[in-house]
Image: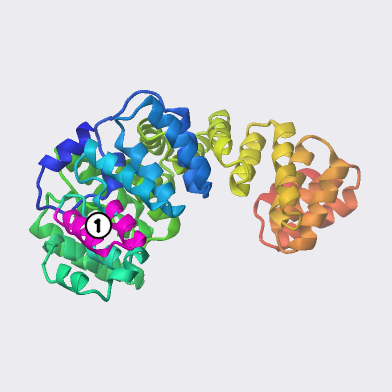
Amino acid sequence: MYLLKVMQKSQPNNITVLFFAIILVLAVPCRAQGPDAAFMAGSASLRSGDLRGAVDRFTQAIARNNADERLFIYRGRAYLRLKEYENALRDFNEANEIVPGIADIWLARAYALAGDGDQALSFLTSHLASNYRLPEDSIKKDPAFDNLQNSLGWSALWEKEWYNDQERAGGEVAYYIRKGIPDKAITVLDAEILKTPGEAGLLTMRGEVYYTTGNYAAAISDYSAAIELYKKGGTGYVPKEGLDKGQAEFAEGGLYALRGQAYLKATRYKDALNDLNRVVRENPAFFPAYLARAEANAGLKSYDASVRDVLTYLQYFNQDQHAIYLCGEYYYLAEDYINALKYFNRNLKEDPNSSLYYKSRGKAYLKAATYRYAISDLSMSLDLNPDDAETWMYFGLAKILSGDRENGCSDLEKARQLGSTEVVRVIVENCR
């Protein structure tokens, strides 16, 4: 709550702040108490599309804490998707009672979907006049407002200029990102940053463009500068238009999540871990951070910690095949091959035609000295993907360890021909 009030008071004409950016980006801890289990479960249910389950769990959380506007907004979102508009409107109004204006955009959507265009336009007007306003393009393309777009009220609404130069630049940048022209986006941002060097939102946008182009050092530099400005009470909009799905998702986690992701790409695992620890501590229901933190810990060879994070994630998304696979991989790296096999078995039960899953389980069988099963799985993997050099290497090694040196060495040679450099050492040790 403190952060929201600070942002409402600071620099009202700067680039506006997305709801998630307000809650998740900022540099000062908020709601330091431990996560509410019902809030965590409700957030997971909302994310996975279990809307009725989300309503039930947020209701439990609200029974324990009715002073957290997020709970009403999240439950309202679930009601909205269930087309229970009266319930959604009630929740969004409750959120506004706690933080005035925070849910105006949701009230506008709910009224529009319920068929009350006048009320929708009224709350949309309030939203556009607030420090929470979303970018113009985002609002105009929102399907919730499709039925308003041919109305006189909609045309009148956009006759007023709601956005300043920096915000319009943000829209232009989003356009260039969507069109795959990052150099033009950088040119626009460089010019705007020269004019307003203290604008955290512009630095954040440039950081995201740099990230998109693979310039992770520059992205980290811009994210860090933006964080310092936020600490001083600056504002800024974190755009998601035009970003790939993974990056847009991390934008919802805020600047520390974005910088943590950039640190990961730059293989600066300790720095990534510091940022992602903060994200998880302050925003425990931001679930992508658990998988990202697991990757950072794996980079530091703290595989047990990686396993713990993926297991936490799987408590809420137990059918996520990628997370199940990661859990198996981290158990494998931790040399716990029995548990690794359990998770690769789950993968193969769901997808028995994956060369990757057969290879991974075959490697685990190999490490567990169960060579017959290793050979079977690695053979299946090669049937599905015959050009994978690493699989040929493990296939050959499994044969050698089972006593078939001649055929094993032939397979190792095949791996070498396919470009494996790692296999050269294995050939020297076993075949020469």
The front one of 386 and 384 is 384
User: Is residue 386 among the parts visible in the rendering?
Assistant: yes
Q: Quadrant of residue 380?
A: bottom right
Instruction: Determine whether, in the image, residue 120 is placed left or right of residue 245.
Output: left
Identify the residue shown where x is 30% and y is 52%.
Answer: 106
Quadrant the N terminus occupies: top left
Residue 117 is inside the magenta segment: yes
Residue 143 percent coordinates (x, y): 37, 66
The front one of 367 and 94 is 94
Specify the farthest residue to the bottom. Answer: 150
Identify the residue shown where x is 12% and y is 63%.
Answer: 165
Q: Quadrant of residue 108?
A: bottom left
Q: Is residue 134 above or below residue 143?
A: above
Q: Given the image, on which type of amino acid does mark 1 rest?
A: Leu
User: What range of the chain is rendered magenta?
Assistant: 106-129
Which element type, helix, strand or loop, lies under badge 1? loop
Residue 222 percent coordinates (x, y): 25, 50
Residue 179 is inside the magenta segment: no
> Which residue is denoted by mark 1 in the rendering?
134
User: Is residue 260 among the parts visible in the rendering?
Assistant: no
Please identify the dominant SS of the magenta region.
helix
Q: Quadrant of residue 387?
A: bottom right
Label 1 packing within 10 angstroms: few (<14), some (14-19), many (20+):
many
Residue 86 percent coordinates (x, y): 36, 49
Residue 398 percent coordinates (x, y): 82, 45
